[in-house]
Each structure stands twice: as C-alpha cells, then as structure tokens.
Image (cartoon, rainbow, N blue to C red):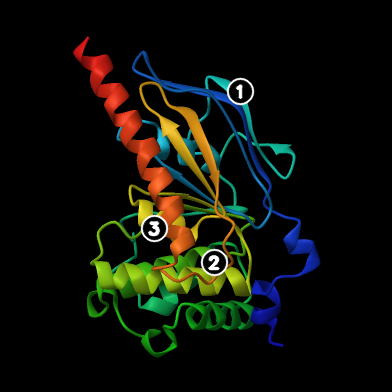
Amino acid sequence: MSAAARALAPTPARASRGKLELRGVSKIFKDQVVLDDVSLTCAPGEIVVVVGPSGCGKSTLLSLAAGHSRPEKGAVLLDDKLFVGPGPDRTMVFQEHGLFPWLDAADNVAFGLRMANIPKSERDARVSEALSMVHLTHAAKKLVHELSGGMRQRVAIARALVMDPALLLMDEPFAALDAQTRTLLHEQIQEIWVASPKTILFVTHSVGEAVRLANRIVVMHAHPGRVRAVIDVDVPHPRRFDSPALSEIAHRVRFEIEDEVNRVRKQLAE
C-alpha cells in the first residue's frame, strides 16, 4: 500500500477520531437568537445531515463546528477537546468551490499540504490518492476554467480529504449543480466514505440528499434554531435512490419540515 493510501485508508486509530459534541450551544447575531441551547453529538465515522427551513441556523451550526465562530453559551468539542478556533483536524467544503484559478487541479489539492510543509514526495503521493478517490486522476493538470462544475466540486472535496481531517464539514456543497451531477456526487461521496470513513456533518435543503447520505438526520426548529427531531437512517451504504426504505424515511422528514414551516408561518401571522 502506498504512503498516500495508508494516510487515507481507515485504520483502528482513525476509526476512533472525529467525535463532535455541541453541548447546549447558543448563538446570537445582532440581538437575534439564531441557535438556542442546541446539543448534538456526531459519533466517529458517522454522517449526520442537518435539514430544516431557512433561518433555522444550519450554516451557523457548521460555523461553530468549524471554529469559525464561537457560541455565546455552551461548548464545542472534538474528540473530547474543547476548541475555540479553526484547526487542521476540521475541513470545510462550501457551495462555492473556492479553488485558485491560476493553479491546476493537483496544485489546488496540494495547497494545504504545502502550507503545512509536507515533503514533496509525500505531498505528491497524497494528492494522487485524493484525486483518484474522486475519479479525477485524468484531470490533475487541468486549470479550473477547464473543469465542469461537478469536477470543481470534486477537486474541492479532494482538497479537504487530502488533509486527513477527523471531521469533514459540508455546507450545501452540491446545491448549485444539476440533478444528474448531484446524483453522481452522492454516489462518489458514499464510495469515499465506505473506503475511508470520516465523521461528516452535512447541511442541505434537499430531503433526497439527506436520506441518501445520512446515518442520522437532524431536523431543526426555526426562529430560534433548536433540534426538532432526530431520525435514524438504518440503511447500509451505498444506497439506491429508489429504495422503498429511503422513500419512507424521506416522507417522515418532509412531514417534519412542512409542519415546522407551517408552525413558523402561523407564528408570524399572529
């Protein structure tokens, strides 16, 4: 096995990494409570997907988990250690890929490793392995403008994975893509996770995306954001999109979200 494969492949030590805990966190922006007393635990190697109506604090939750912002109350821990800022053990994939247009795909993936002073031989091996995991070995020397939207997002995912984080945070990473490309990326995310389990906290507006990827789905209350329901998705990966079991879970998730939207509308009308 190559050095890169050893770095990215699951091992017993890595299987125990990535326990994320949000303990009673509250967040206020401009005198408005965005999150109120939210507690959530993501087990090592678990995919947790957060859904809910606009304004429920989904992206704020990710920002706290990344260390980009700090809660007014409560605490955020990774592997039982309190943190108050960003760190290399957490990487984020956004809706916008954020790639450097003057670098090719391989150099974009390698950027974080270069900043961490990883030796070139190890860096090249890890970049090659990461690009292989997202099926982009053939595109290593392509510039950003030569890549499709889906390919750019795969490069962004490879850039996150190559750092071997304990926690991968994903903020609606496929929202801007067409349906066919999203379906392809759902399959590839499952392949990557099966081959190299990471703790993933994923935010989306898509119920279909949530049930296809999640081990657990967290449905949020809005105004302020609180946990409304937690739904287990006990279906092995990789998953068929047309699975009857997933359809049943999707129906429950949609009911929770629609009921929450109706609750908010009624509250605003009073």
Q: Nearer the viewer, residue 226 or 82?
A: 226
Q: Residues within 10 Å of mark 3 (few under 14, many from 20)?
A: many
Would you name the residue on which mark 3 appears?
A: 209
Residue 118: x and y in percent read 62, 70
User: Which label lies toward us, 2 or 3?
Assistant: 3
Q: Nearer the viewer, residue 261 or 102?
A: 261
Counting residues from the start of the chain, the first of labels 1 and 3 encountered is 1
Asked if residue 172 can be seen in this view, the reply is no
Counting residues from the start of the chain, the first of labels 2 and 3 encountered is 2
Residue drawn at the location 80% of the way across and 66% of the way down: 12
Q: Residues within 10 Å of mark 1 (few under 14, many from 20)?
A: some
Would you name the residue on which mark 1 appears?
A: 74
Query: In 3D space, how far apart are the residues under numbered discs 2 and 3 (Cα atoms)?
Result: 20 Å
- Local SS, label 3: helix
Q: Nearer the viewer, residue 15 or 63?
A: 15
Would you name the residue on which mark 2 appears?
A: 161
Residue drawn at the location 69% of the way across and 53% of the way down: 44
Vertical placement of 258 versus 117: above or below? above
Q: Quadrant of residue 39?
A: top right
Query: In 3D space, how far apart are the residues under numbered discs 1 and 3 (Cα atoms)?
Result: 30 Å
Residue 81: x and y in percent read 73, 39
- Local SS, label 2: helix
